[in-house]
Image (cartoon, coloured by chain):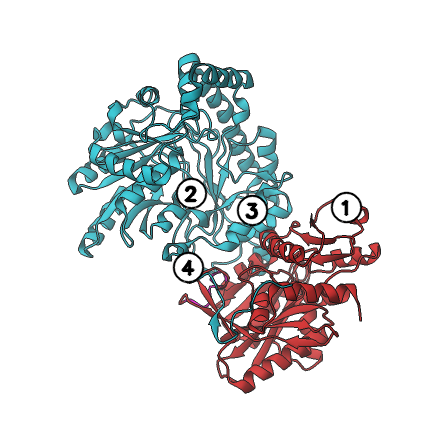
């Protein structure tokens, strides 16, 4: 039986997280009796995969290359089955702007936004439109790169003076950025895993509860000890069900496969839910949300890995 | 076989290990910054981020013959544990190194440690209870930050200027702390060629700092890794020499004058403090490496350590000059930077609308790295500054690295100009030039009011 290649590392800003996710996946695959080859994705990627001819590739590569459809496209060309979403879904989810447009077209609520490329500012005077945007979205507003997996480059602008510097920061990560209406409220994540038959299942909701006072501090949210994760989130039954349905709708609308994590905000009014984004290669570390949600649903990490791999090997 | 029972799926805290972590682990540095820094050691990256001396300047033959002589003359001793305080012979050589900077060492008052970093750790271990105050410089040595945090110290940072720590601000702060009933346990300073700012504390300030320590009976931790790496100007006496060993704990190291790989540093301190530190070291690692202590002793006995330091000075001076020239050529006029007379680092400050943590992400795409200024503060300041190391790369790499950083900075300056309206040209900032006098030049954090109009890089 040929081995499973675990794709990891790479050059993205999430290299470290990816290495941690992959180490855990590799352990699980070994426990499940598979031969495992870890592949740190670099210049020799195609050559190595072609030589290895693995039974399947487990994509544990976060960020650029792993989540934007690049390795998936190459794996298609090589004819190697792989875990998770296909090229099109990766492209849709990685570009938050594209994802939000698609969601909006499907009537799925997502915070109001405007997005611009750097050239719009440089060549078309988009800066002149900022006051109108700021009026429409109101302060504080969130400025973020269109494509960036981690919290890096996400800034709050509390007033007009903050916007240019926030844009400069966001443009450090991507050529396209978005300005988004800030939704005050609770930070929820709904993980989705497909059943053996390919039917997506929403797992118990995880809530990220910041322990630091300044809830504008995005970076703090993802640090151990600065945020507490609670699962299942303490939510009224009806809201929890709504959030899960919404996440499933997102999963289908964007064409995800295998598994994914959908991030939402529950407005402080306690009623309105807004979808922020979907992640096609969610973190798989000890403290990552999807594996924790899976365990809360009675799916062990090994069972999760086995199921996701099984879906890749036996496409519906 | 999953081999693992799922835990009960009732409501539970998902950070399964969170309950096990000590409270001190909760004050760690930003994971985002850590993830960024992890990318700086890709081989294709020109990293101006490290604090690395250039060990390729050490002759391999010398290394081989020294190791051979240790094996021949002291094999069993080299492979054995040693005394916690270190070997007395090495203490003698340490006295020699300190004498080169005008210090007299009582060889009973030295503790040989595993790198200078262990001294910082042991001083904290000996003096700091959670919540105790440490006074440090702003910016401070980034490597001390996790140590201070892990002892849950309350760190108060005092601004620097061209003459080092602002002693007036220090006195105000000490008064304020006293009014609040909080007594700092020690003042941490790198007075000579400061890491990261590159500035050197003036002699009057050194004297005042020592006087304050005596008057207020406060300890000072003088971290002096670079004192012998002076490229110009007259040496200044270390605080330890001015103090006479009463209130100054001196931190020395072989890392920058010989090798960081041997992991050997030392503390010279008042005897009661040293005794406590000795107990702390016993608990930490019993003793430092016998093998490398014997290696260093052999090196001092067989070779001319001063001439090696002399050769390092030649190499690093040329690199510093290359970096200063490259900065003048490639950094926009809105930037300012220090002009160190020695050491390993230059501190550059950009306009405050540039966040150097985000800039690093951009710079990494151009395969160049630096340390974002925030790493040198515990309070989120330093967001527009960066530390640049000039000892770890040759001149060509330094010029290319600075050129690449300059290009991404220029890109962001231009973008900001576009975003804030009609690009305007600022009057040229008084900029440090390589041709200017010998004094350290420093323009530290330039505070601008937000939204003060358009700025753009002029075409040059």
**For residue B19: magenta?**
no
Q: Is residue B229 visible?
A: no
Q: Chain of mark 4?
A: B
Q: Give SS at disc 1.
A: helix
Q: Residues within 10 Å of mark 2 (few under 14, many from 20)?
A: few
In the rendering, which numbered label is found on residue A48? Answer: 1
Q: Is residue B315 above or below residue A112?
A: above
Q: Quadrant of residue A312?
A: bottom right
Q: Which residue is under mark 4?
A: B20
A161 or B348: nearer the eye? B348
A144 or B281: nearer the eye? B281
Question: On the same chain: label 3 and label 4?
Answer: yes
**Residue drawn 71% across and 46% down?**
A42
Q: Position of residue B325 (x, y in %)?
A: 54, 32
Q: Which residue is under mark 2?
A: B143
A275 or B453: nearer the eye? A275
């Amino acid at each position: 039986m040929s081995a499973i290649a675990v794709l990891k590392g790479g050059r993205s800003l999430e290299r470290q997280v990816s290495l941690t996710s992959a180490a855990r996946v590799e352990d699980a695959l070994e426990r499940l009796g598979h031969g495992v080859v870890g592949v740190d994705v670099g210049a020799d990627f195609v050559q190595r995969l072609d030589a290895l001819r693995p039974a399947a590739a487990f994509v544990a590569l976060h960020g650029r290359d792993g989540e934007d459809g690049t390795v998936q496209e190459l794996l298609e060309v090589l004819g190697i089955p792989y875990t998770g979403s296909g090229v099109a879904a990766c492209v849709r989810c990685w570009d938050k702007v594209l994802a939000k447009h698609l969601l909006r077209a499907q009537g799925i609520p997502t915070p109001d936004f405007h997005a611009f490329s750097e050239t719009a500012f440089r060549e078309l005077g988009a800066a002149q439109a900022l006051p109108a945007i700021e009026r429409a979205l109101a302060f504080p507003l969130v400025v973020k790169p269109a494509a960036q997996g981690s919290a890096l480059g996400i800034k709050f602008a509390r007033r007009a003076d903050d916007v240019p510097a926030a844009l400069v920061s966001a443009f450090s990560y991507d050529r396209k950025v978005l300005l988004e209406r800030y939704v005050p409220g609770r930070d929820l994540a709904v993980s989705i895993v497909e059943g053996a038959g390919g039917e997506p299942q929403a797992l118990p909701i995880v809530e990220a509860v910041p322990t630091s006072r300044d809830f504008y501090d995005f970076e703090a949210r993802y640090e151990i000890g600065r945020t507490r994760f609670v699962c299942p989130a303490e939510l009224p039954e009806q809201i929890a069900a709504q959030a899960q349905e919404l996440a499933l709708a997102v999963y289908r609308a964007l064409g995800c496969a295998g598994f994914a994590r959908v991030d939402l905000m529950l407005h402080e009014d306690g009623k309105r839910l807004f979808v922020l984004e979907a992640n096609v290669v969610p973190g798989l570390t000890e403290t990552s949300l999807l594996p924790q949600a899976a365990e809360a649903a009675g799916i062990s990490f090994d069972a999760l890995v086995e199921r996701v791999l099984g879906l890749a090997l036996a496409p519906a | 076989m999953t081999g693992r029972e799922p835990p009960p799926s009732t409501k539970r805290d998902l950070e399964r290990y969170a309950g096990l972590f000590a409270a001190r682990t909760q004050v760690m540095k930003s994971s985002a910054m850590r993830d960024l820094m992890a990318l700086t050691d890709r081989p294709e990256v020109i990293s101006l981020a490290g604090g690395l001396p250039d060990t390729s300047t050490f002759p391999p033959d010398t290394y081989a013959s020294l190791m051979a002589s240790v094996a021949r003359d002291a094999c069993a001793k080299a492979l054995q544990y040693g005394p916690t305080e270190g070997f007395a012979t090495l203490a003698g050589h340490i006295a020699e190194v300190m004498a080169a900077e005008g210090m007299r060492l009582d060889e009973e008052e030295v503790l040989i440690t595993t790198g200078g970093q262990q001294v910082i750790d042991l001083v904290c271990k000996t003096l700091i209870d959670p919540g105790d105050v440490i006074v440090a410089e702003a910016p401070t040595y980034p490597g001390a930050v996790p140590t201070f945090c892990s002892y849950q110290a309350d760190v108060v940072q005092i601004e620097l200027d061209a003459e080092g720590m602002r002693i007036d601000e220090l006195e105000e702060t000490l008064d304020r702390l006293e009014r609040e009933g909080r007594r700092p346990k020690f003042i941490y300073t790198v007075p000579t060629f400061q890491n990261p700012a590159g500035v050197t504390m003036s002699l009057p300030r050194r004297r005042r700092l020592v006087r304050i320590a005596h008057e207020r009976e406060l300890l000072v931790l003088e971290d002096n890794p670079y004192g012998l790496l002076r490229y110009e100007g007259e040496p200044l006496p270390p605080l330890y020499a001015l103090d006479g060993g009463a209130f100054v704990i001196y931190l020395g190291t072989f890392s920058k004058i010989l090798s960081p790989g041997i992991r050997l540093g030392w503390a010279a301190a008042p005897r009661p403090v040293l005794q406590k530190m000795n107990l702390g070291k016993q608990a930490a690692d019993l003793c430092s490496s016998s093998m490398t202590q014997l290696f260093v002793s052999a090196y001092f006995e067989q070779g001319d350590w001063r001439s090696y330091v002399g050769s390092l000075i030649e190499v690093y001076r040329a690199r510093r000059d290359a970096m200063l020239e490259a900065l003048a050529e490639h950094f926009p006029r809105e930037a300012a930077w220090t002009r160190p007379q020695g050491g390993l680092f230059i501190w550059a400050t950009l306009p405050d609308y540039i966040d150097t943590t985000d800039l690093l992400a951009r710079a990494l795409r151009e395969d160049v790295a630096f340390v974002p200024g925030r790493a040198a503060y515990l309070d989120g300041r330093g967001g527009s500054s960066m530390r640049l190391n000039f000892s770890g790369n040759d001149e060509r790499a330094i010029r290319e690295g600075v050129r690449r950083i300059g290009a991404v900075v220029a890109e962001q300056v231009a973008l900001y100009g576009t975003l804030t309206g009609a690009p305007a040209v600022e009057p040229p900032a008084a900029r440090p030039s390589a041709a200017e006098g010998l004094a350290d030049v420093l323009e530290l954090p330039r505070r601008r009011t937000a939204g003060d109009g358009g700025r753009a890089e002029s075409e040059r």
